[in-house]
Image: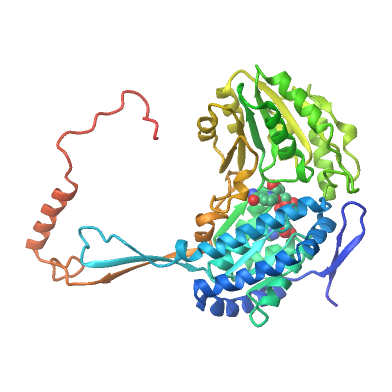
Amino acid sequence: MTETFDSLNPANGDVVGTYPVHGADEVDAAVDRAHEAATWWSGLTFAERKEVLTTWKGVMTRRIAQLSHLVHEETGKPHGDAQLEIVLMLDHLSWAAGHARKVLGRRSVSPGMLMANQAATVEYKPLGVIGVIGPWNYPVFTPMGSIAYALAAGNAVVFKPSEYTPGVGTWLADTFAEVVPDHPVLQVVTGGGETGAALARARVGKVAFTGSTATGKKVMAAAAERLTPVIVEAGGKDALIVDEDADLVAAADAAVWGGMANAGQTCAGVERVYVHEKVYDDFVSEVLEQAGRVRAGSDSQAQIGPITMPSQVGVIASHVDDALARGGRALLGGRDAVGERFVQPTVLVDVPEDSLAVTDETFGPTLTIAKVADMDEAVARANASRYALGSTVFSSARGAEIAARLRTGMTAVNSVISFAAIPSLPFGGVGDSGFGRIHGPDGLKEFTFAKATARQRVKPPMLLTSFSRTAKEDGQLTQLATLLHGGSKTLPKAPRKGLRRSR
Ligand code: NAD
């Protein structure tokens, strides 16, 4: 008999659904079927794939209430938040389907002077089958950031959703199968870490993993057995910086929503805030007022839901405990705010920079707020994390300048997490936040390999790639090289000290 597991409603523990635990044999079989489907799918034109993906988009859009409810049941997040992630996903799907030809299709490039007799083209070919391993916090938006782009690029996909949201993953594959009943272009395998590990070891062209940094390392190790490339979209400890001239009400709104929406369970959510000392007190009061109106609960009036993964409650508690034990103060919430299933908004100040609440991903509705002397200090502290996913700046005059100095994959200026909703922008991290990019042109290319073709148009004046090349031609080549690359006689002046800043 097939082993099964239950998907539970985190607000009350009710069983939402029961799903099979797929083992390595079943995962391998799904990947084999996917290879056949990939042959068919990659043989379609970009326009044909766009038509299929657009039809699927229509089916999902018309059933948005059904999918929102399922997301609500499996994650506990409010219906409105569930709908928001679905709408953003639809926009990404639309962009990926609509831009795949322009980004990936064959185009001519200059062959250069030496090879002027050649016609040079480059195109981006699908990798075949992509294994997608997803998290539970945004069970539609996050995995679809890989799935939509991988499909648009001409790949088949085998998707292993989180064991906390198998129903959402199954729903996505089922609706796709309604549009394409004869070819398993998008399949789902369900189960826990073992199922994910089997997918990472399977005969796939790439693994797109989204989840914790620790699991990302395991996925890389498993994929290395076949030299399978991976994308790792891992955790974050994103900072929000408030300059002295910032709109404080808007900055506080961004900090509270960015830190507490989805009960803080957002990879690119705000976890740390650094505020210019001149506006620190006013900013903190504004945050307290706004955060004081946010409540976690399962009723329709609650702005945030439960902590989806029960073990995370202990992590949040340990971060709050550590902060308080080391001199931090809770101006809102605190240890009592951490319940069995729900965590109420918590604002911590005077927390040492080396405490867990500042160094590690908390993934709860908590914020640490620290005072800084100037924006140099804010940037230095923000950049001091081993994570580097997203960041936020609030400043009237210097937003772009401060943003450019933040070493993170994405930065929002005077808004929060907006980059994730712009389909043409790449999304991904640096350092412990992972590598590789989803979304945008980079996100399409991520699921392809570059194919270069050089086609000889006319015979060359000198045949360089032949044993028939003569000593005379070697001499002519030297003359040509001097002409092309010999350059000016004067050397550029060396910078006086250090390296010049690249602009
Ligand atoms: P997780 O690492 O526990 O699990 C992620 C997925 O990996 C799940 O499907 C899980 O079953 C699977 N898995 C577990 N062990 C595995 C193994 N050994 N081999 C292969 N797969 C395995 O993460 P989670 O708790 O589901 O998600 C939360 C984390 O995801 C947070 O750290 C969050 O920041 C991160 N996240 C990142 C992004 C991003 O885009 N950067 C987006 C959303 C979430």
Residue at horizontal 66 percent and vertical 24 percent from the top: 275
Question: In the rendered image of this protein, does residue 194 appear above or below residue 254?
Answer: below
Whether residue 133 appears in this view of the structure is yes
Quarter residue 82 falls in: bottom right
Classify residue 380 as left or right of residue 9: left
Q: Position of residue 287 (x, y in %)?
A: 76, 28
Q: Position of residue 387 (x, y in %)?
A: 62, 40
As drawn, the residue found furthest toward the bottom would be 182
Quarter residue 255 falls in: top right
Classify residue 166 as left or right of residue 148: right
Q: Position of residue 475 (x, y in %)?
A: 9, 57
Front residue of 118 and 163: 118
Q: Position of residue 426 (x, y in %)?
A: 54, 50
Residue at horizontal 67 percent and vertical 77 percent from the top: 29
Quarter residue 187 falls in: bottom right
Quadrant where the N terminus sits is bottom right
Question: In the rendered image of this protein, does residue 395 appear above or below residue 197?
Answer: above
Quarter of the rendered image showing ligand 1: bottom right
Q: How many marks?
A: 0
Quadrant where the C terminus sits is top left
Whether residue 388 appears in this view of the structure is no
Front residue of 345 and 202: 345
Question: In the rendered image of this protein, does residue 83 appear above or below residue 38?
Answer: above
Front residue of 270 and 313: 270
Query: Which colour style is shown?
Result: rainbow
As drawn, the residue found furthest toward the left would be 472
Question: In the rendered image of this protein, does residue 205 appear above or below residue 260?
Answer: below
Residue at horizontal 54 percent and vertical 79 percent from the top: 39
Residue at horizontal 79 percent and vertical 51 percent from the top: 80
Classify residue 233 as left or right of residue 321: left
